Image (spheres, rainbow, N blue to C red):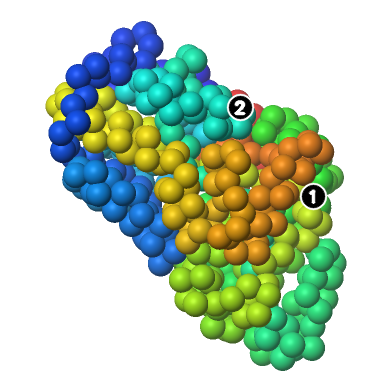
Amino acid sequence: MKKLTTLVLSLLLIAGIAFGGGTKEAPTTATGGPGEVEVLHWWTSGGEAAAVAVLKQLLEDEGHTWIDFAVAGGGGDAAMTVLKSRALAGNPPAAAQVKGPEIQLWGGVLANLNDVAKANDWDNILPKVVADIMKFEGNYVAVPVNVHRINWMWVNPDVFKQAGATIPTTWDELDAAAKKIQAAGLIPIAWGGQPWQEATVFEIIVAGVGGTDFYTQTMIDADVSALKSPTMVKVFETLRMLLSYTDPGAPNRDWNLATSMVIKGEAAMQFMGDWALGEFVAAGKVPDQDFIAMTAPQTEDQFIFNIDSFIMFDVEDPANAGAQQAMARLILEPEFQEAFNVPKGSIPVRLGMSNEPYAAPQRLAMKNFVTSAKTGDLVPSMAHGMAVMPDIRGAILDVVTNFCNSNLSAEDAASQLASAVDVVK
Ligand code: BGC
């Protein structure tokens, strides 16, 4: 982990991005005049685009200019590659979607957002655990947007009906239902064969098969003996079972195309975070009528969380610094929190917001966010960069993807997983 931190920071130094020991002082001269802010993000699907348009509009309503820098590719891996090369070229965008512990890797070269945070009471309107992720050496350097839940199963009830199958609540029931759906000539599982999507399903199975303690040991603590334990073998066996119910078009399929297979009744279910809800809603579908959102098998109590956030790079021009600070402020205002999160499928990160305008799955998520925190079942997503540093995540994704695209046995996959993590740890 230290190795990577040093690497990123020294590359930035070489690229000529000035940086001191801590975060930069917030520009004191941010003017009220119009400025521009270039925003790197990866929100390009129907639901995502509808949500990000809200932020653009609010910023433009204040007279600022939004320069859109969208890098397609769910999960953001492509966007992160582009961000690194822009930073290396000494020309990072003013704002970039960066999440979780990775914020710490950039911390030393980011703009300090303490003034905006103080003026808008971020310490009190955010859950402490979220505020802590947004800080580097005690200073705010990122602003959180929302909370997504990962462990969802998106179901087309008509497909189950056609096959005479029952919607599963355990992995064994899923096996039985999927067999019937396949026998009826339908696709049981809409699968996107991209590493981050495979990792998303993998971590859901880790939570479901192993429970919260096992999830913590493996996906957060990266404990090598737990990673090669018999429970992990069972996780890979379950993943293999799921893979046997996917279609030949799965390799490299985008997540929203997989969601659309469920929407259209071409497939029975998809395992994906609740940005998928945004796609159902954008397609005019109604929960509990056209589709069902359920917690994935055996993960009813758990809430695997994924928080989107933006980091801000220091900018020279005071008007542009003002635009940047306006963006940071707007993101945590109640108006944005509601207008963005409703179409995005996520829930507000700001405390004390009403659940009224939200769809049923989001209301359930809002409730479970609180209950899971109390029972210790609120856990960060490995697949979405919330739980471990990027090098450990990368090692896990490599093994999981290799397993999904080969005939590797579950035993060998578990032992490869442990070795791969051990090397980078
Ligand atoms: C992000 C979501 C996004 C999803 C698919 C996740 O990592 O947190 O905001 O919708 O990737 O692109």
Q: Nearer the viewer, mark 1 or mark 2?
A: 2
Mark 2 CB in 8 Å range of ligand 1? Answer: no
Q: Quadrant of the C terminus?
A: top right
Above or below, 104 against 380 in this view is above
Q: Amino acid at mark 1?
A: Asp
Above or below, 349 against 246 in this view is above
Q: Amino acid at mark 2?
A: Lys
Front-most of residues 1 and 320? 320
Element at label 2 = helix
Indicate the position of residue 216 as horizontal and vertical percent values.
74, 35
Above or below, 47 against 94 in this view is below
Mark 2 is surrounded, within 10 Å at the Cα level, by few (under 14), some (14 to 19) or many (20 or more) other residues, namely few
Marks 1/2: CA–CA distance? 22 Å
**In the rendered view, does 309 fall on the left or right side of 20?**
right
User: Disc 1 designates what residue?
Assistant: 301
Which numbered disc flags the more N-terminal residue, 1 or 2? 2
User: Disc 2 designates what residue?
Assistant: 128
